[in-house]
Image (cartoon, rainbow, N blue to C red):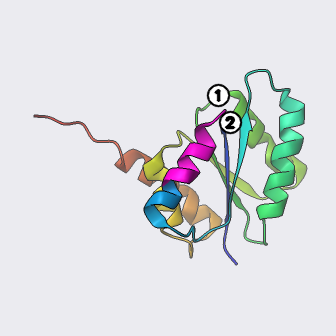
Amino acid sequence: MGVGVLLVTHEAMGAALVGAARHVLGRLPLPVDVVEVAASADPDNTLRDAAAHARSLDAGAGVLVLTDLYGSTPCNVAQRLPSLGITTHCVSGLNLPMLLRVLNYPEQSLDELAQTAASGGRGGIHIDHA
């Protein structure tokens, strides 16, 4: 029983990242779903949608919610999920290295996976000093 992974992002970003992860890994070792938020989306409707997706992903170990931009509507929605009785951790700043790192540690608990996500996201940034 692994942690579910829910990407709550601005339009087209979440699906693109999941597609790239499938390209790199082939099979995804954790259940992954995406909720993409349109610019005109109502936050309350988006919360209901995200909650339905999170509940379907939670097999008892909780859901890691990855959002693209801290303070944005996707992030604000994700941070409201625990108030609906859903066990989650939310990590913002989503990038492909973060998602790949998470998917490479399917045995980790929700708490561990949140730390792995943050570390993977930061570790995937490189400045060429040439």
x, y percent for residue 7:
66, 48
Image position of 92 (left or right of 97):
right
Q: In which quarter of the image is the C terminus?
A: top left
x, y percent for residue 93:
52, 39
The residue shown at (66%, 32%) is 11
Is 110 one of the magenta-colored residues?
A: no
Image position of 114 (left or right of 128):
right
The residues colored magenta run 11-20
Q: Mark 2 belongs to which amino acid?
A: Cys
Tell me, yes or no, if residue 113 can be seen here: yes
- Picture layout, residue 87 above or below residue 65: below
Determine whether label 2 and label 1 are within 8 Å by CB.
yes
Image position of 22 (left or right of 127):
right
Residue wearing tag 2: 75
Tell me, yes or no, if residue 67 can be seen here: no
Residue 3, labelled with which disc?
A: none
Count neighbours of disc 2 (C-alpha within 10 A) and say few if under 14, some if 14 to 19, many if 20 or more: many
